[in-house]
Image (tube, rainbow, N blue to C red):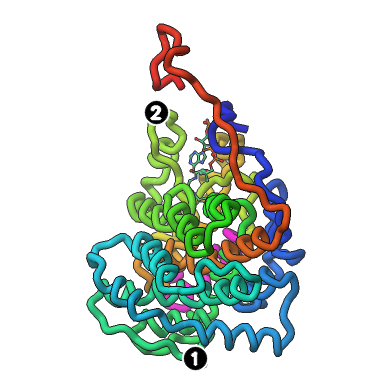
Amino acid sequence: MSSDATKGLEGIVAAKTYLSDVRGDVGELIYRGYDINQLAGNIGYEETVYLLHYGKLPNQSELSALKTKLVSYRQLPQGVIDLIQSLPKDTVPMNALRTGISALGCFDSSSEDNSPESLQEKALKIIAQIPIVTAYFHLYRQGRPLVESRPDLNEAANFLYLINGGTEAEKDSVDTLDMCYVLHADHGMNASTFASRVTVATLSDIYSAVTSAIGTLKGPLHGGANEAALNMLREIGDVKNIPKFIEKAKDKNDPFKLMGFGHRVYKNYDPRAKVMQKTCHEVLAEIGKKDDKILQVALELEKIALKDDYFIEKKLYPNIDFYSGITLNAMGFPSTMFTPLFAVARTAGWIAHWKEMYLDPKNRIGRPRQLSVSYTHLRAHETEADL
Ligand code: ACO
């Protein structure tokens, strides 16, 4: 545990949830009783949404009803489309997403209706609309026309169809993106889920909760690490440079960290990183780039780090972001799209947590304490920096 107990809330139990269980010591992730290794590659994103939200895997008719609902909600209000198209084209995509989701709340006349029926509808509406906001901003910033969604396509296929400007993606790409969505859908009390739960506990609305979560996911210590990890691997550039970067990561006086490495809970290999590493190999082989230089750097970096005493003692392993960036890059996504894609998938979890809390009659506002240090009590030799 960190030496400064006021930093990072390490070890604090902030909620009880039935949704997912991150078993950090053994490197397992469980969604509603199912190991992620059983789910990834075997069920799709829509089934995962159903599992997280209703506590069981859907039968055919339940799945088909969920898909029909999601498809029916894909159309964005024109005001939100206009707003997206008025943003500066160099807006950071996560900022555009945050603004777009907040705007969706302004255009939803039911945003403050907290009846169970309305909560249920809004939950699915946001899951259906967040990928459209992401794709539309992407098209707009590239100066390309917006495309209508295709009702016959699942969530992953429709997203690829939109960002490809109306061309259907190959099945392999759809399956890979679908699996990425499944892997990212929920992850216990991670920082963005925690942020959204704090918002929900005040009985604020769902759009505010998701907006809080998006702002939190954006940071490079959390969801932003996928983009940062790929940038780092590119900066390393060649396996011969790895030792220099390992030394930098170990140097206490250097702020550099191995991005995509380490985790607050996993003190073992992140199970999602294992799946992602395998997928990464498959995707690169499919596009004839199995000897991709960046992948070679990643594999060698992982190998060296896992044999190094610093990483062994601190139990630092690759996390999901270490290989997701290379995979998404190989699929043709620009790196600025990696974290928004994470947000699209994690919305399933954020909203499942929101429902779980809203339906809990024993909900209480989240209000921790702080250690107050009065200026008048500063001792002569202390400065604010000592606090
Ligand atoms: N590279 C080098 N050293 C590291 C790394 C790393 N990636 N991660 C942790 N350490 C070191 C710390 O410097 C610290 O050393 P010390 O005890 O000598 O001070 C020790 O390991 C413990 O690290 P903390 O930062 O205290 O661990 P914490 O649980 O607070 O942070 C985090 C976890 C944010 C993931 C951290 O490991 C990190 O910054 N990793 C890189 C960013 C990253 O990949 N984030 C994605 C996380 S997964 C996700 O959100 C999807």
Q: Is residue 288 highlighted in magenta? A: yes
Point out the frontmost of discs 2 and 1. Answer: 1
Residue 64 in the image: x percent, y percent? 64, 88
Left or right of residue 182, residue 20 in this image: right
Q: Secondary structure at mark 1?
A: loop
Instruction: Give the residue displayed 58% in from the left and 33% down from the top.
Output: 369
Question: In the displayed structure, does residue 127 sit left or right of residue 230?
Answer: right
- Tell me, for residue 151, which label it has, or none: 1
The amino acid type of the residue labelled 2 equals Asn
- Helix, strand, or loop for circle 2? loop
The circle drawn on residue 253 is: 2
Residue at point 47%, 55% (across, down) = 212
The alpha-carbon separation of the residues under discs 2 and 1 comes to: 54 Å
Which class describes the residues within 10 Å of circle 2: few (<14), some (14-19), or many (20+)?
few
Of residues 11 and 268, the one nearer the viewer is: 11
Question: Eyeballing the image, is 232 above or below 173?
Answer: above
**Amino acid type, residue under disc 1 in the picture:** Pro
Residue 155: image location, x then y, percent: 52, 80
Reply yes or no: does residue 153 show up in magenta: no
**x, y percentage for residue 236?**
36, 50
Q: Which residues are magenta?
A: 272-290
Q: Is residue 54 above or below residue 356?
A: below
The relative height of residue 376 versus residue 322 in the rendered view (above or below) is above
Q: Is residue 186 left or right of residue 141?
A: right
The outermost residue toward the top is 380
